[in-house]
Amino acid sequence: LKFVCVSNDGTDEHMVWLIGLKNIFARQLPNMPKEYIVRLVMDRNHKSVMVIRCNQVVGGITYRPYVSQKFGEIAFCAITADEQVKGYGTRLMNHLKQHARDVDGLTHFLTYADNNAVGYFVKQGFTKEIYLEKERWHGYIKDYDGGILMECKIDPKLPYTD
Ligand code: ACO
């Protein structure tokens, strides 16, 4: 089992993983247009943290780091159907936080959570209260109805992974 963070850099192996992740998102997020999922997963401004087991994608999170604003926007998050509620979603989020802090220099995450995923995000430390000053994110992330804006502060020191 491994956790990787990849973007569309033209590497064959990364492309295969990104396509696998795109397929999981398409299935797990049926309200999202498939073209929109493909566009963001393959967009070079986005990165994806993935769980890989036996060279198969188990799930992942696609996000866009806004390095100058020090926050990241989570676009999609999903674990494949038969592997949900086994702890992968939590480990994935911890790897994302560690990578975003140590590699991108981010301090916060924002996401529009689906109603049924709010419980998962709350368990990962997200709140419906937005403490981040509006000037830091307004105009960067697009308004999206059908979701609840949630925020997570990344701890500056905590070791999120072992
Ligand atoms: N609602 C409430 N609680 C949840 C949910 C949920 N939908 N999913 C998991 N949890 C809880 C678990 O019970 C667990 O609680 P515990 O620590 O008290 O035992 C905790 O959250 C973590 O569970 P994991 O096993 O780590 O979560 P999992 O691997 O299943 O991943 C995820 C969670 C990503 C939401 C997965 O269930 C999934 O892919 N769901 C379908 C797609 C989806 O809804 N994605 C999010 C959409 S919003 C967005 O993408 C921005």
Image (cartoon, rainbow, N blue to C red):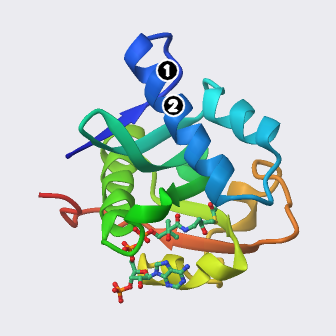
**Picture coordinates of residue 90, whole percent (x, y):** 35, 69
> In the image, is residue 26 above or below residue 47?
below
Mark 1, residue position = 15
Q: Residue at 31% across / 53% down in the picture?
A: 95
**Picture coordinates of residue 11, whole percent (x, y):** 43, 11
* Among the 4 quarters of the image, the one containing residue 128: bottom right
Q: Can residue 64 be seen here?
A: no
Q: Are marks 1 and 2 in contact (CB under 8 Å)?
A: yes
* Residue type, label 2: Leu
Estimate the spatial distance between the alpha carbons at disc 1 and disc 2, rounded to whole Å.
5 Å
Q: Residue at 61% across / 53% down in the picture?
A: 76
* Among the 4 quarters of the image, the one containing residue 125: bottom left
Query: Which type of secondary structure does the marked residue at label 1 adopt?
Result: helix
- Give residue 40's mark: none
Depth check: 152 or 1 in front? 1
Depth check: 74 or 101 in front? 74
Depth check: 101 or 60 in front? 60
Farthest residue to the left: give it.
162
Query: Which type of secondary structure does the marked residue at label 2 adopt?
Result: helix
* Residue type, label 1: Met
Mark 2, residue position = 18
Q: Residue at 48% across / 40% down in the picture?
A: 48
The local crowd at label 1, few if under 14, some if 14 to 19, many if 20 or more residues have their Cα within 10 Å, is some
State the quadrant of the C terminus. bottom left
Q: Residue at 47% across / 56% down in the picture?
A: 80
The local crowd at label 2, few if under 14, some if 14 to 19, many if 20 or more residues have their Cα within 10 Å, is many
> In the image, is residue 6 above or below residue 146?
above
> In the image, is residue 8 above or below residue 68?
above
**Picture coordinates of residue 8, whole percent (x, y):** 53, 21
